[in-house]
Image (cartoon, rainbow, N blue to C red):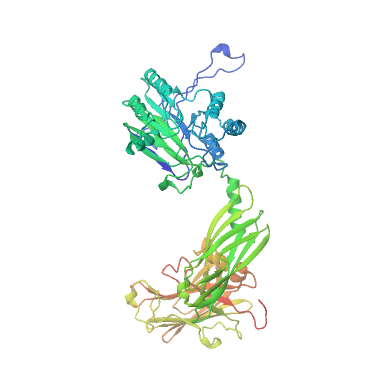
Amino acid sequence: MRKQIITLFWCVSLVAACALDVTAHPPEDHEPGHAQRTELPKGLVLPATTGPHPWSDKPVLSDPNRFQIAIMTDRTGGHRPGVWMKAVESVNLLRPDFVMSVGDLIEGYTEDPEQVEREWQEFLGFIDQMEMKFFFVGGNHDLTNPMMHEKWRKHFGPEWYSFDYNGVHFICLCSEDPNFRIGDTQMNWLKADLEKSATARWTLVFLHKPLWFISERYRSFGMQDSTNWPEVEKLLHGRRHTVFAGHTHHYAQFHRNGATYYQLATTGGGSQLRGIPYGEFDHIMWLTMEKEGPYVANLLLDGIVPGDRVTEETLARFRTFLAKAKLEVAPILLGQGEGLSEGQIDIRLINEFDAPVRVSGRIEGLPLRGLTVDPVSLDLEAAPQASESLSVAVQFSQPVPIADLGNTLFRAHVETLEKPPLVADIVIPVVIDRRFDCPRATGEVVLDGNARDWKELAHQTEKAPLVVGPAHAWQGKGDAHVAFDFSQDEKSLNFFARVSDDKILEGDQLILFLDTRPISARSRQTEFVPGFYRVSFPAVEFRGPLTMQSAAGVKATCEAVVARQNEGYTIEASIPRSILTDQQGKDWHSFQAALLLEDTDEPGDPPVGILWRGTRRIRNNNLGYGHFVNQPPSGSAR
């Protein structure tokens, strides 16, 4: 006997492949003038081919004796409203032949007949919305006392019964005969029922309490076992069978009596829902009956999604939500040599969507050195076409170096205030880094490759920079080195670099990387996208326009001069200020920049790359790039 359990975490769609069996009506059934129906071909009809064919050689699963049913388990014992009805909606989507249960359908445990009647009417309302047949099995919450047994018989008749389907015998037992027992009358009925169904290809047994487990515990404790389960197993022994129960609200598979027994978890009953390792989850068991026995899968309710849950329209709306519910986290940028003692992280929700949006989250990743964060939990809510902000105060008992702050992030949960809500979980890095200034030019910058228009260059590669490529080929600052600076005027972002190189060969160049997007965008998406530029300055005499390459074919042009010097070369470039203002507006805040100096010392050798900021993936993302902040004209307000 071969069986298989498959646990599915997201979504399972199980469809029975059935052969077509459409028979034409006899001629007399047709009215004059109506075309007669012709019999359709049965089964799978494949085109005739020679050689390879675009389908596998596995069989079509079209056995006419195959069928599929759903099994729902405990709804009550601390029921959680809405779960059972969600399961009803799910089985309506899955289209089983019918649905079985293992009891505990109402809360019960009362002597008030009117309360019991109300509970049954509520439950029968759920069953009215189920689109296929449902088989009732009584549990301890359904059959708590004599009055409730009477109510059961009034609504449903017998407390134990059997039926057959496609050669499989179904037995529904009552474990409350009385409590924790298969009573003598039920045992006599079961014996006769099994004798009458001896030729069944398989027997499926359903009851509420896992009496095999209870029986074993009684005997292990030296207590009298009144369950009658050992007698049930004797009757079933040698017969191909499977047993299903509920009651414990914990899932488990057992092997007993030469068969497989299943103890189901919950379909809305009380549970800590700690997950699969604990056997605690809401589920529907899906059973496919094969010749060799049942195959079962546990379908977690959260993993069953209607086919129309995501349509072209809903997907477009969700993408609009992601684009228009904007979160901005302002950076903390520190001066040269400073550590962070205290600072303020400003968070802003800009809601350009058509529904109210709520954000909740936390700042994570800060070192715990006397750390105080206020507030700890962050909540923002903005109406459509509105924005809301809050500030998070961060304080340490002693200054923390910038290098220890690189893992700080804002973990946010964003959702619309509508039913059903649109939901997204977003992680935004919190930039805590050194500040570099982009000052106003003190006079006219003449594009000539001469440093006379520039004061002392503020930035240069470090003594021990990050080196990529054949690192042994770089011999230190005397081999290749760059110093540079930026300035700005009304039209241009100005760039000047002085490259020291003891031997200039073909392939030597300086590559400038610029990310001109708003800081919220460039911290959220670090990859090379529109607004992220790179321009290469070859180490050859040059004057004229150079292409600044961006993603998706976007291009800009800068004017540049490259001039050879005694021991290297200089670069001066005028970059259109519009690449900043188009992205951020005229009062732009900052941009990020990094440099890659490529140097070759021997013809034919691969170049070595010397970095000013950035990582080994400097060509692909902005991680580690320097932040250059706009310095407005003296006396102006930002």
- Residue 223 location, x and y as percent? 35, 35
- Residue 515 location, x and y as percent? 53, 69
- Taking the view exactly as shown, the residue that stands out farthest to the top is 28
* Foreground residue among 100 and 583: 100
Q: Decide if residue 138 is on the left or right side of residue 262.
A: right
- Residue 618 location, x and y as percent? 45, 69
At x 64% / y 52%, what residue is drawn?
A: 417
Snapshot quadrant of residue 345: bottom right
- Residue 528 location, x and y as percent? 50, 64
Q: Decide if residue 374 is on the left or right side of residue 207.
A: right
Q: Is residue 497 visible?
A: no
At x 61% / y 14%, what residue is drawn?
A: 31
Total count of labels:
0
| Above-or-below relation of 181 to 349 | above
Snapshot quadrant of residue 248: top left
| Above-or-below relation of 565 to 304 | below
The quadrant in which the C terminus is found is bottom right
Snapshot quadrant of residue 306: top right
* Foreground residue among 149 and 34: 149
